Amino acid sequence: MPVNVAIIGSGPAGFYAAAALIDSGEDVCIDVIERLPTPFGLIRGGVAADHQTTKNISKKFDKTALMDQVRFYGNIEVGREISLSDLREMYDAVVLAQGAPVDRTLNIPGADKPGVFGAAAFVGWYNAHPD
């Protein structure tokens, strides 16, 4: 009987976790659950277009996503559409790999001034991230 695993977050951490589970040799079924409609997190929307070497890692994630043991569920926000406690009841293991949702404010003079943005906000805008 396979080990049923939910991975919350489909960015690099989520897909590396899925690949590691598959490579472990255990019989696993993995459901990758993502708040956005598309997978790959910052690789898709957080890497500048001129960094193709970094963006090419998505080919490895494509390979993992297409494996029989892996299913992708997009547009599902844990805590809104389904609770973490419900997921813990449904799966043998739950991996939290959703990353940081917001930038941390730096404790330096001027960090709170208008027009000062964190890197995640800027890169998201630059790459047309849906948020």
Image (cartoon, rainbow, N blue to C red):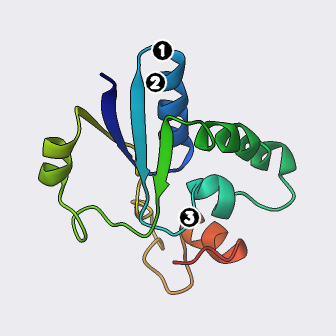
The amino acid pointed to by label 2 is Leu
Tell me the residue that label 2 is attached to. 21
- C-beta proximity under 8 Å, tags 1 and 2: yes
What numbered label is drawn on residue 24? 1
Q: Tell me which label, 2 or 3, sits earlier in the chain.
A: 2
| Residue at (52, 69) in percent of width and height | 37
Circle 3 packing at 10 Å, graded few (<14), some (14-19), many (20+), is some
The amino acid pointed to by label 3 is Ala
Q: Quadrant of the N terminus?
A: top left
| Residue at (84, 43) in percent of width and height | 53
* Residue found at the very far front of the displayed protein: 1
Tell me the residue that label 3 is attached to. 120
Q: Nearer the viewer, mark 3 or mark 1?
A: 1
Q: Is residue 131 above or below residue 35?
A: below
Q: Tell me which label, 3 or 1, sits earlier in the chain.
A: 1
Compared across the picture, whether 49 is left or right of 44 comes to right
Q: In what element is the residue under mark 1?
A: loop
| Residue at (68, 44) in percent of width and height | 62
